[in-house]
Amino acid sequence: MINETPAKGRSAMPRRQMILAGFFFNPQGDHRLSWRHPRAPGREFLDLDYYRRLAEAAERAKLDTIFIADHLGIWDTYGSGLAHYANPRLEPLSLVSALSAVTKDIGFMVTASSSYNEPFNTARMFASMDHISRGRVAWNVVTSALEEEAANFGRDANIEHAVRYERAAEFLDVAKALWDSWEDDALVIDKATGLFAHREHVHYLDHRGKHFKVKGPLNVPRPPQGHPVIVQAGSSDAGRNLAAAHADVHFAVIRSEAEGLSYRADINSRLAKYGRAPESLKLLPGILPIVAASASEAQEKQDYLETLMLDAVAVDLLSSWAGVDLSRYPLDGPVPDLPDEGTFNGWRTWLALVKDDANKGLSIRQLARKIANTGSVPLVAGTASQVADQLEAWFVSGVADGYNLMFPLLPEDWLNFMQTVVPELQRRGLFRTEYEPGTLRDRLGLARPQNAFAARREAPDRVRAGKAGIRP
C-alpha cells in the first residue's frame, strides 16, 4: 500500500535492474500498417477491454509502466493519411483513468502537449490522476510538431521550434509550482476543530511570465509523488536541454552502442550544468522487439509485416519527417536536398535521422520503406534468449537504464514478450520478479522532489538555528 502522506524529500533508491515500458501509439502496433495484419484488432481498439488485456498482461510480467504516445490531430497533410493510416486513437488521460482502476501496480506514462494546453488544467489533471492511481502516473511532455495539430488550435502554422521549447520550459516551471502550492502537511481535515487545511501551507504563485499568467494555488492537494514523473522525448539540442533541466525519464532514439554511449555522455554533461547527477535521469532508448521460436521465424514475421506496407504511405511518412513532398520526385531516384535542421519547425530529431540515412545512397523508395517498416529505432528480432542478450548488452554497457518497448504488432508481440523475454530477463537477475512497494517514482529509483514553497518557508528558520548554534 502506498503511503497516503508521503515523507518530504524522500531520497531515491538505487535501481539495479532495467526499466521496461510497454509503448503504444498506433493501437494495432508500432508498424505503420499493422492494422492490415489478420491477427491485428479491428474496431475493438476503441474498447476498454482491449487495453485492459494489454495492461493486465504487462502487470503480470511486472513491467514498470505503459507509455502512451499521442497526437492532437489527424495526420492528413499527405494523401495517404486518411485513406490508409490508422489515425484514430483514444485520448490518453481518459484511457488511463479507466486503466488505473483495473490495475494495482503498473505505472502509466501519459502524453500531453505543452504547446496546446494551459499549465493549470494540465497540472490539475495529472495531480488528480496521481491521486486516483495512488502515485503511478508520469507526464510525457511534448511540444507538438505537426502542422495538423496547430490547425486544430487556431493557428495557420506550427509554433516556431525555439518558442515551443521556451514555452515548454515555462509551462513545466508553472506546473511544478502548482503541484507544490499545497505542502504535504497542508491538508488537515480535523472534524473536531473545523480546520480543513493549514492556510499558511497553501501558496499562491502569482506567476507572470512571457507565456503564462497564473495566480494559483492548485485546487488539488500535492500529488502522492510530489510531482508526477516527468518524461521527455525530443533529441534535438533544445529537447536535450529541456530533458536535462526538467525530466526524470528521457526517451531517446539510439541505433548503436557507440552512438548510445556518446548520447549518454552528452546528456550527463548537460545534467551537470543544471546541478544534477547522472542517476537523476533515466535513459530509455526505444526498440522494436519481435520474438519467435527461432531467428528465422522472427525474420519471417518481420518480412510479412513489410509486405503490408504501401509505397504511398511510406513516401508520405518520409515526406512528413523530411518536410518536403517527396512524391513529386522519381521514387527510384536520390533523395533531394532537405531543409536545414537549425531552421526546421517540424521534428528535428526525425529530420536528422532521415538526412543521416539519405547520405547512405538510398533511393526515395528504399529510404521510405525502411523508415515506414522499422521506424526510427532498432529492430531486435530472434528467440527470447537472443532478444534478452541484446537488451542486456546495452544495459550492462551503460547505454540504457531500460527500454521503451515498441511492439510492431499488437496484441501478439506484446503478449509474446511478456510471456517469454521477461522470464528470461528475470532468470538473469536483470528484471524484478515482484513489484517493490511505493510509487512509480520510487520504483524507478527517482527522488521525491522537495516542496519548493516549504523549502523557502523553512530556510529562515534554518538560518536562525544555525546562528544560534542549534542544528535545524
Image (cartoon, rainbow, N blue to C red):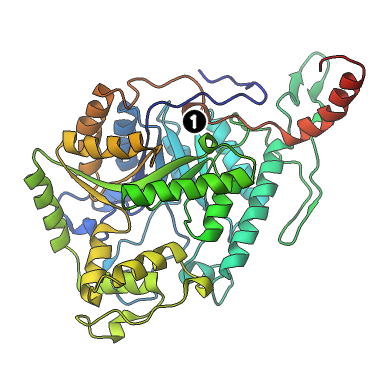
What residue is rendered at 67% in x and 42% in y? 176
Q: Is residue 449 above or below residue 170?
A: above
Front residue of 105 and 142: 142
- Residue 142 appears in the rendering: no
Q: Is residue 362 left or right of residue 430?
A: left
Residue 246 percent coordinates (x, y): 60, 46
What residue is rendered at 9% in x and 38% in y? 293
Residue 396 percent coordinates (x, y): 34, 34
Residue 234 percent coordinates (x, y): 48, 56
- Residue 91 appears in the rendering: yes
| Residue annotated with mark 1 | 440
Secondary element at tag 1 = helix
Q: Is residue 354 left or right of residue 363?
A: right
What type is the residue that disc 1 sits on?
Answer: Leu
Q: Is residue 210 above or below residue 410?
A: below
What residue is rendered at 9% in x and 51% in y? 300
Residue 443 percent coordinates (x, y): 47, 27
